[in-house]
Image (cartoon, helix red, strand yellow):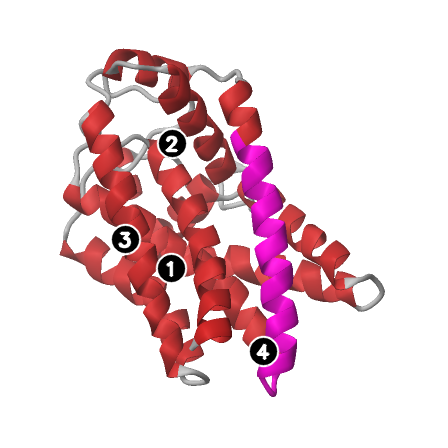
Amino acid sequence: MKREIHLFFTALMFYTRIPCPKNIDHNPDYLNKATRYFPLIGWIVGTISFVAYYLASLFLETETAVIWGIIAGILTTGAFHEDGFADVCDGFGGGWTKEKILLIMKDSAIGAYGAIGILLLLVLKFKVISEMIAESSMLTPNATLTIFLLFVTAQSVSRFVAITIIFTYSYSRDDETSKSKPIAKTYAWQEVVGSLFFGLLPLVILSFFQWQIVLVLIPIFLTRFFLARYFYKWIDGYTGDCLGAAQQVCEVIFYISILALWKFI
């Protein structure tokens, strides 16, 4: 149990800005094993985002409250995944060879592709979350609980889907370097089972209210498939930035899929 707690705090330290015990570091062995708790971190991020949204919604308009929820999530993770998305936009937008793409993504400066990409991503996320909350208020008897579960599920499922890229592809950088932090590159069956459990449990709970919601996994995994294949085509695998981009894109696809289900099914 003590070891699992250490692994959890390793994941918490790596993927968020939440303070952790001083004995937690970026030990590569612990980092690889902490992969199993990556979706669990989504529970925490989703909960913090929902609390910020809910408190703001008590005295502000829904759309303004949604912005506060998004801000809270970004502050919790330190824009960890958003930064990865921006780097992927810059790298794959401006590079035409594996070496050039990796070099651009390693650069800490943000370019036009990254700036435009993150702007559009945040605008889209704001819009679809606002619509999802409005639809939930009309369609579900306990809207607050449903919205909370949607916030948590979006974060856990998107992280699970992103981390599965590690299970099927290889790390791309030959020099094993990263611009800031190390990244998990290996796994065992415990990481697969753990990420699967923590990633999908909120979705299972949410499906008790409406079983069709499990269908969101279809577009999400299709998105994951095409992103992973695209990364492999250009850089022969993945990087930490690629995983961050996959998480962000799959999170937005989750919101869009929920809206589509409620509107057409």
- Residue 135 against residue 199 in the figure, above or below: below
The residue pinned by badge 2 equals 241
Please name the residue shown 35% across and 13% down the image: 103
Between 61 and 8, the residue placed more toward the observer is 61
Report the magenta residues as a range.
117-142
Amino acid type assigned to the residue bearing label 4 in the image: Leu
x%, y% of residue 184?
A: 27, 38
Q: Nearer the viewer, mark 1 or mark 3?
A: 3
x%, y% of residue 163?
A: 29, 47
The residue pinned by badge 3 equals 222
Q: Nearer the viewer, mark 2 or mark 3?
A: 3
Please name the residue shown 54% across and 41% down the image: 121
Instruction: Name the secondary structure under disc 3.
Output: helix
Earlier-in-chain disc, 4 versus 2 = 4
Q: Which mark is residue 145?
A: 4
Quarter occupied by the N terminus: bottom left
152 displayed left or right of 230: right
Earlier-in-chain disc, 1 versus 3 = 1
Instruction: Name the secondary structure under disc 2.
Output: helix
The residue pinned by badge 1 equals 157
Q: Which mark is residue 140?
A: none
How crowded is the residue under tag 3: few (<14 C-alpha within 10 Å), some, or many (20+)? Answer: few
- Say which quarter of the image contains residue 257: bottom left
- Marks 1 and 4, how far apart in space? 18 Å
- Marks 2 and 3, how far apart in space? 19 Å
109 displayed left or right of 243: right
- Say which quarter of the image contains residue 101: top left
Amino acid type assigned to the residue bearing label 2 in the image: Asp
